[in-house]
Amino acid sequence: MLRTVIFAAGLVVAAPSLAQSEPAGDYAEVNGMRMYYEVSGEGEPIVVLPGAHMNIITMGRIIPLLAEAHKVYALEFQGHGRTNDIDRPITYENLADDVAAFMDAVGLERADIFGYSMGAGAGLQLSIRHPDKVGRLVAASMSYSSEGWQPVFQEMIPQMSLEMFAQFEEQWKSLAPNPDGYEAFIDRMIALEHEEFDWQEGVAALEIPVLLITSDADVTVLEHSVELFRLLGGGIMGDMGQPLPKSRLAVLPATSHTAIITQTDLLMGFIEPFLKDETPKGFFEQ
């Protein structure tokens, strides 16, 4: 769920190489914004929620791969990509409510959710705040508490400033409806980094299946991801005659936070079986 300097640095290299021909987009009126979104593919619906400072283009190949078997609704959050910023804090709760309002606007009663980084946090809050709207949640690189960040990242947060993002301003302005609003947008994103949160109670009450995807060199401490998995009912021993938990945990090896979204073959190998409720068969299963 890394959302600022570390992630933005990756966009400088990633954005050109991940650019692709996009399906025709549209706008939905959502909580005072004109939220940009694109629809592609056919099948059961899945909503894609990008990471911080990202847009549909920089999400890369995961969207067209998902569209091979699903109807994908990919959106751009407040102040991101082609969605206008508004005079309102960017918080996980606000982002989640925006996704719920977006689903209402496009006639989506319920859908699976795939969120990456900040989008995964928004997806988790959507599941907590609007549980009837979520079928299954795929959450890649996220934390349920601000205490779960790596210590080195927590130490960097107080040092964040507008100047750290100067090199990314041109890219942001190339899509933004209001190119003069960059400073206000960065102020909101830095404020998000300072937000302390703990969603343990809400996570423990979830009834939907969740696929957690993390990496062994992520912004989240690995032990924190395991704790999150246990809160969701995971961590039991299989082969003992009881059903496996509905939720799952995948750890990508030799992978940093910004490299998770580029490992599309690995991601799809985890995501599709989860969405289809498929599990590998053990020796003791017929």
Image (cartoon, grey):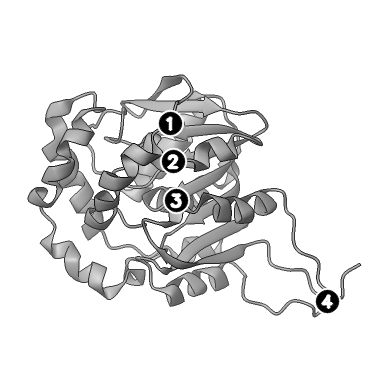
Looking at the rendered structure, the secondary structure element under dot 4 is: loop
Q: Nearer the viewer, residue 257 or 20?
A: 20
Label of residue 262 in the image: 3
- Asked whether the residues under the numbered discs 1 and 2 touch, taking CB atoms below 8 Å apart as contact, a structural biologist would say yes
Report how far apart the C-alphas of labels 1 and 2 lie in the structure.
8 Å
Q: Is residue 157 above or below residue 92?
A: below
Label of residue 60 in the image: 2
Relative horizontal placement of residue 28, taking residue 240 as reference (left or right)? left
User: Which residue is pictured at 76% across the width and 64% down the height?
Assistant: 280
The answer to whether residue 125 is seen in the rendering is: no
- Asked whether the residues under the numbered discs 4 and 3 touch, taking CB atoms below 8 Å apart as contact, a structural biologist would say no
Circle 4: residue type: Gly
- Asked whether the residues under the numbered discs 3 and 2 touch, taking CB atoms below 8 Å apart as contact, a structural biologist would say yes
User: Which residue is pictured at 60% across the width and 37% down the height?
Assistant: 110
* Residue bearing the label numbered 4: 241
Give the position of the C terminus as an image quadrant: bottom right
* Residue bearing the label numbered 1: 20
Report how far apart the C-alphas of labels 4 and 1 lie in the structure.
47 Å
